Amino acid sequence: MSADKNILVTSPLIPPLEEFISYLQQIWDKKWITNNGSFHKEFEAALAEYLGVEYISVFTNGTLPLITALQALNIQGEVITTPYSFVATTHAIWWNGLKPVFVDIDPVTCNIDPDKIEEAITDKTTAIMPVHCYGNPCDTEKIKAIADKHGLKVIYDAAHVFGVTENGKSVIEAGDMSALSFHATKVYNTLEGGALVCHDADTKRYIDDLKNFGIHGETEVVAPGINSKMDEVRASYGLLNLKYVDAAIEARRKAAEYYREALRGVPGLRYFEDLPGVRHNYSYFPVFINAAEFGMTRDELYFKMKEYKVYGRRYFYPLISTFETYRNLPSAAPANLPVATRMADEVICLPMHHELTEEMLERVVRAVIMNSRK
């Protein structure tokens, strides 16, 4: 690779062109490009098998499953969630006319802190929407115990945990529903896309109605649904990418090992280790910069890295709770979210994807270390 080539945070998983063209030819021959076609059905079945779940519905993007899950479970009032996520998590709550209530995060995983959830519950709380941040599974058992105690539903934003298992069990089995994202920046993608996992056939049928305008059969509309069906082109693309995702995850694992070894001991720099019993997918590689020890702030490092044509991402920054739509909520006060505020100010995600070469990894590490006190 030439020294002046940019190194970006993500590189989408793209199947071989000739294979994809053969699928497009089949779609062309069948003249069926959307509305529950053969590839759509085959894709849902293949996903369910790969992910170790029984009921899954695919969507045209990763935000609509979150919106639909809240509607399918008839969530009302307040929903407890995390400010440390992509803004779509909270937008889904807002779009349903609900009130998001922010809770601080655990500094070890960046997931919602279960010990902070209970004190945020009121008589208006009906659900919890945690996020498996960076592919680190939430403490699902503790969250379930709290939800069961207070009669709450749990909907996981599982955008980062495609293929992640804990103690041999799929992480997306937790909660009442789990929403996945297949955006091009994810470990696994369908260009754009997403899915919603539930636990019984009746609920899946209702979800499938909701994502098709609420239409049930030819003449009945059962709810004010929306058009969020996945087309045949993206379904076929997803089928192809399933063949290559394990190899992509393994390449990411090796890149994560390289980063950890090369950055070990750098003053003021912290990163995540693998969690015990978890099969990770290495969706991101965030590092956290303590300016006093590292020698410069996270933002200073972020812009210095660009001089080396290494493009990291301050992800998640700013916090959702700081955006204009949400900043006036009582739960959005920075004093209520000290850990999330600190992590957002310190995080930078290093390039992490399946096409990183050793030369690329060396350049990323150099761009970090040359600006540290090491």
Image (cartoon, rainbow, N blue to C red):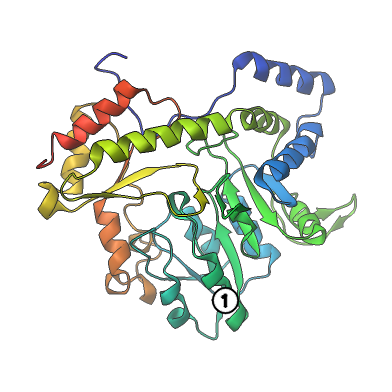
Is 63 situated above or below 263?
below
Judged left or right of residue 14, residue 335 is: left
The residue under the point 52% across, 64% down is 94
Say which of 287 and 313 sits in front: 287
Q: Quadrant of the C terminus?
A: top left
Give percent across and percent down for residue 137: 50, 56
The residue under the point 54% across, 59% down is 92
Is 188 situated above or below 23?
below
The residue under the point 75% across, 37% down is 40
In the figure, residue 140 lies in which quadrant? bottom right
Q: Quadrant of the N terminus?
A: top left
**Disc 1 element:** helix
The residue under the point 72% across, 16% down is 22
Give percent across and percent down for residue 42: 78, 35
Q: Dot 1: few (<14), some (14–19), or many (≥20) neighbours within 10 Å?
A: few
In the figure, residue 194 lies in which quadrant? top right
The reply to whether residue 225 is visible in this rendering is yes
The reply to whether residue 86 is visible in this rendering is no
Q: What residue did someone put label 1 on?
A: 145
Give percent across and percent down for residue 296: 12, 46
Is 329 situated above or below 23?
below
Say which of 240 and 34 sits in front: 240
Q: How many marks?
A: 1
Give percent across and percent down for residue 164: 55, 48
Amino acid tagged 1: Ala
